[in-house]
Image (spheres, helix red, strand yellow):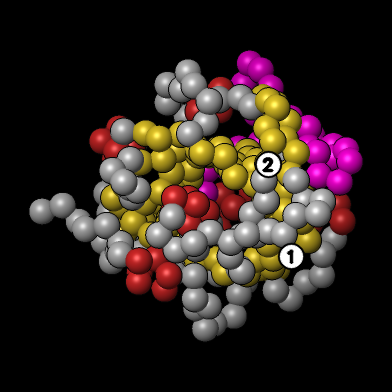
């Protein structure tokens, strides 16, 4: 029997604080969300047992998310400028577990901080990849983001502008596509002990209009997907959030 999709009550419950101490503090800034509709059956084939593709209006979604990681630190340590700030770009889809918890499944997470790659692989069992990355910011929020994964033939570039000046950010309304794509508070990881989940907690993403002048889908091909020959089906941007990170359970 197919497992039912999470209802809105379950989706809202996922963003509640878990009531325990985090293991890490982070800030995620200058986020760009590029999403394409995808065949749910194709996504399901890529998932481990115990996870089911999550859908909105019958469609699965595949996303590319470049952003900045800032002020990263374990709970009992201060930030260190040379290791606490770096770049990350993830390829992701949306899933739920057998208990109906909605979350994210990562296909890859490119990162230019070797210690962060080691930590995430070792303690969170996430598929982090070493990459050379740069992202100069011009004007208040114009980003020229470049990522070249180790061993990949070419770099990928994403040029985008978050329209933050004179704009009041909005928050995704529960039940909308934006809420489905952005408001995710669990990640799932495949570990030697099976599927484990990790929770994050933050305020809902403040969303602002974003203009995207350049994007690249070759990172999807690096993860075994056929590159979509069309513009993204959904684009969103956010100046960022402060995040609490909880251990895998």
In the rendered image, the quadrant that contains the C terminus is bottom left
Residue nearer the viewer, 25 or 3: 3
Task: Identify the mark at residue 210; answer none if there is no mark.
Answer: 2
Magenta-colored span: 126-155
The answer to whether marks 1 and 2 mark residues whose Cβ atoms lie closer than 8 Å is: no
Q: Residue at x 35, y 48 (%)?
A: 56
17 relative to 52, above or below: below
Graded by Cα atoms within 10 Å as few (under 14), some (14 to 19) or many (20 or more), the crowding at tag 2 reads many
- Residue at the image position 48 percent from the left and 34 percent from the top: 233
Front label number (1 vs 2): 2
Secondary structure of the residue carrying numbered label 1: strand
Whether residue 248 sits left or right of residue 86 in the image: it is left
Q: Which residue is mark 1?
A: 73
Secondary structure type for disc 2: strand
Residue plotted at (81% across, 44% down): 141
Q: Quadrant of residue 203?
A: bottom right
Residue 87 in the image: state x and y as whole percent.
Answer: 73, 44
């Amino acid at each position: 029997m197919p497992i039912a999709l999470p209802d809105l009550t379950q989706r809202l419950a996922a963003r509640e604080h878990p009531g325990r101490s985090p293991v890490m503090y982070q800030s995620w800034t200058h986020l760009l969300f590029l999403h394409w509709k995808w065949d749910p059956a194709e996504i399901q084939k890529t998932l481990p047992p115990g996870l089911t593709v999550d859908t909105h209006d019958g469609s699965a979604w595949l996303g590319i998310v470049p952003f900045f990681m800032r002020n990263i630190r374990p709970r009992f340590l201060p930030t260190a400028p040379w290791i606490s700030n770096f770049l990350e770009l993830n390829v992701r889809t949306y899933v739920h577990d057998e208990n109906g918890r909605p979350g994210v499944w990562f296909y890859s997470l490119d990162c230019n901080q070797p210690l962060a790659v080691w930590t995430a692989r070792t303690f969170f069992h996430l598929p982090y990849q070493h990459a050379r990355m740069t992202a100069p910011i011009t004007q208040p929020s114009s980003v020229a983001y470049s990522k070249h994964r180790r061993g990949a033939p070419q770099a990928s570039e994403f040029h985008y502008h978050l329209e933050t000046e004179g704009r009041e950010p909005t928050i995704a309304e529960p039940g909308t596509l934006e809420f489905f794509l952005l408001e995710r508070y669990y990640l799932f990881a495949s570990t030697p002990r099976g599927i484990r989940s990790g929770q994050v907690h933050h305020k809902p993403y403040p969303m602002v209009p974003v203009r995207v002048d350049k994007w690249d889908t070759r990172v999807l091909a690096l993860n075994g997907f056929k590159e979509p020959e069309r513009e993204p089906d959904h684009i969103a941007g956010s100046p960022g959030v402060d995040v609490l990170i909880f251990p895998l359970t």
